[in-house]
Image: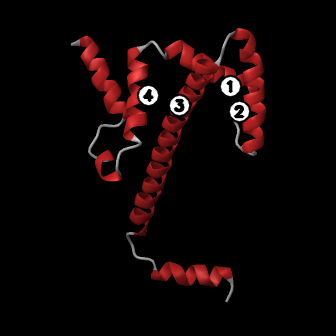
């Protein structure tokens, strides 16, 4: 039986509301992709914050900063081949990200809250507001 014959036979077995099923499944796949992307982005922001913080806490002065960034970039690329984002320039960006925002309570609270929440038992995580809700609460608190 050819592929065309199989496809025609299958069409006769597909219920009339198949288009609705397909639309619902596609919507669910897109939502899952978006949710996963947001989770990855949150994790990367926390990672970059931590890397910047670690560099600053160990950096004696600016002269050592260049050597540290260069060596760290090289070692991370060796340890994690195929994982992007560990160039010398990006290591400096992580450092600058931390320097720029570490004294801003709103950003600091968001990063700290996210790091705390990711360590909680799975059952409790669903009961807590996500980063977007926390940001909104912080904004509302600043206005009120």
Vertical order, 4 against 118 (above or below): below
Cα–Cα gap, marks 1 and 4 = 18 Å
- Give me the residue at 70% from left, 38% from top: 84
Q: Is residue 24 left or right of residue 70?
A: left
- Give me the residue at 50% from left, 15% from top: 101
The N terminus lies in quadrant:
bottom right
Vertical order, 109 against 21 (above or below): above
- What residue is shown with label 2? 86
Is the residue under label 4 in contact with that under label 1 (CB below 8 Å)? no
10 Å neighbourhood of mark 2: few (<14), some, or many (≥20)? Answer: many
First-in-chain label (4 vs 3): 3
Cα–Cα gap, marks 3 and 2 = 14 Å
**For residue 111, which numbered disc appears in the image?**
4
Cα–Cα gap, marks 2 and 1 = 6 Å
Badge count: 4
Is the residue under label 4 in contact with that under label 2 (CB below 8 Å)? no
First-in-chain label (1 vs 3): 3
- Give me the residue at 76% from left, 36% from top: 75
Is the residue under label 1 in contact with that under label 2 (CB below 8 Å)? yes
Vertical order, 88 against 15 (above or below): above
First-in-chain label (3 vs 2): 3
Is the residue under label 3 in contact with that under label 4 (CB below 8 Å)? yes
Cα–Cα gap, marks 1 and 3 = 13 Å
Residue 99 % position (x, y): 56, 14
First-in-chain label (2 vs 1): 2
The answer to which of 63 and 134 lies nearer the viewer is 63
10 Å neighbourhood of mark 1: few (<14), some, or many (≥20)? Answer: many
**For residue 91, which numbered disc appears in the image?**
1
The answer to which of 92 and 53 lies nearer the viewer is 53
**For residue 45, which numbered disc appears in the image?**
3
The C terminus lies in quadrant:
top left
């Amino acid at each position: 039986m050819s592929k065309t014959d199989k496809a025609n036979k299958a069409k006769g077995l597909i219920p009339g509301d198949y288009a609705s099923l397909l639309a619902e499944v596609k919507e669910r796949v897109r939502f899952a992709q978006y949710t996963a992307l947001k989770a990855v982005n949150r994790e990367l922001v926390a990672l970059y914050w931590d890397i910047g913080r670690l560099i600053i806490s160990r950096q004696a002065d600016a002269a050592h900063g260049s050597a540290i960034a260069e060596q760290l970039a090289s070692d991370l690329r060796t340890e994690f081949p195929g994982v992007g984002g560990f160039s010398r320039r990006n290591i400096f960006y992580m450092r600058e990200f931390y320097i720029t925002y570490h004294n801003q309570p709103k950003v600091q609270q968001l990063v700290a809250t996210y790091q705390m929440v990711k360590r909680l038992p799975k059952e409790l995580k669903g009961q807590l507001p996500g980063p977007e809700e926390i940001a909104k609460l912080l904004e509302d608190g600043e206005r009120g």
